[in-house]
Amino acid sequence: MPRVRNHVNPLKLETWARESLVLPSQGEVEVELGCADAQFLFQRAALAPARVHIGIEIRVDLVHDVNLRATTQGLTNLRAVFANINRDLDRLLPDGRVQRIFINFPDPWFKRRHHKRRLLTPELAAAIERKLAVSGQLLFQSDVWELALDAMAVLESTDGLVNQRGAWSFLPDHDFGARSLREVRCAAKGLHIWRMLYRRL
Ligand SMILES: C[S@@+](CC[C@H](N)C(=O)[O-])C[C@H]1O[C@@H](n2cnc3c(N)ncnc32)[C@H](O)[C@@H]1O
């Protein structure tokens, strides 16, 4: 199983995927931000072979591993891309094209002093809102209360995103039919998982 402990500091990396992704003009597209081994996306891809699944990941070894496994399994609807979400999302994806964006257990750095490295900044939330199709969904999951609360504060103040459970409400569980590796591990340890589901207006 791939480990996710060799953290990459996104503020220090300098080389990135430079091209935009070429997506089919029709059909659903789903994206996981920080996919690691992409277990969640592999399960989603198995549910809907016609849908496109893209994982964006800052660790190039994990990206290669995901793409190798997808090829070996004959999956043509799943691909991982090496990029820094905070810097590259706007360029990678066309506006209004994505049906679902998943942020599953995003930050290895959750301490207060690492706040500037947080994945879900107001700028990223605005970019997510631009990338989602009308009625597109954003799922956020974390086992870290402080991080989930900060993410909720960002999302609640993002124009164009509405909390599906009501303002400032968490989602007890999701029904996307997939579980990320971290999600499975948290559940096995009995940790509480803070979940939120937003819809683009
Ligand atoms: C804690 S892991 C969770 C992985 C997976 N989503 C899961 O739930 O099992 C967070 C992942 O996000 C990636 N990541 C963190 N910041 C990123 C960034 N700015 N751009 C792309 N990937 C990032 C990390 O490399 C890591 O693989």
Image (cartoon, grey):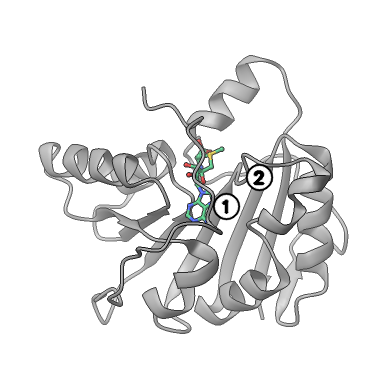
Q: Quadrant of the N terminus?
A: top left
Question: Would you place residue 122 above or below residue 183 in this image?
Answer: below
Q: Residue at x 47, y 33 (%)?
A: 6
Asked if the residue under mark 2 is in contact with the one under mark 1, i.e. CB atoms within 8 Å, the reply is yes
Q: Quadrant of residue 136?
A: bottom right
Residue at coordinates 58% horizontally, 77% vertically from top-left?
A: 127
Determine which quarter of the picture holds residue 111: top right
Label for residue 157? none
Q: Quadrant of the C terminus?
A: bottom right
Looking at the rendered structure, the secondary structure element under dot 2 is: strand
Residue 11 percent coordinates (x, y): 56, 59
Q: Is residue 170 visible?
A: no
Q: Is residue 9 visible?
A: yes
Left or right? Give the position of 31 relative to 175: left
Residue under label 1: 103
- Residue carrying label 2: 141
| Local crowd size for mark 1, using a 10 Å CA cut-off: few (<14), some (14–19), many (≥20) | many
First in sequence: mark 1 vs mark 2: 1
Secondary structure of the residue carrying numbered label 1: strand
Farthest residue toward the right?
168
Which residue is rendered at x = 35% and y = 65% of the image? 16
Name the spot of residue 191 as percent of width and height, x first: 73, 23
In screen coordinates, is 125 left or right of 20? right
Q: Is mark 1 within 8 Å of ligand 1?
A: yes
Asked whether mark 2 lies closer than 8 Å to ligand 1, one says yes
| Amino acid beneath label 2 | Gln
Cα separation between marks 1 and 2: 6 Å
Total labels: the figure holds 2
- Callout 1, which amino acid? Ile
Q: Residue at x 30, y 40 (%)?
A: 61
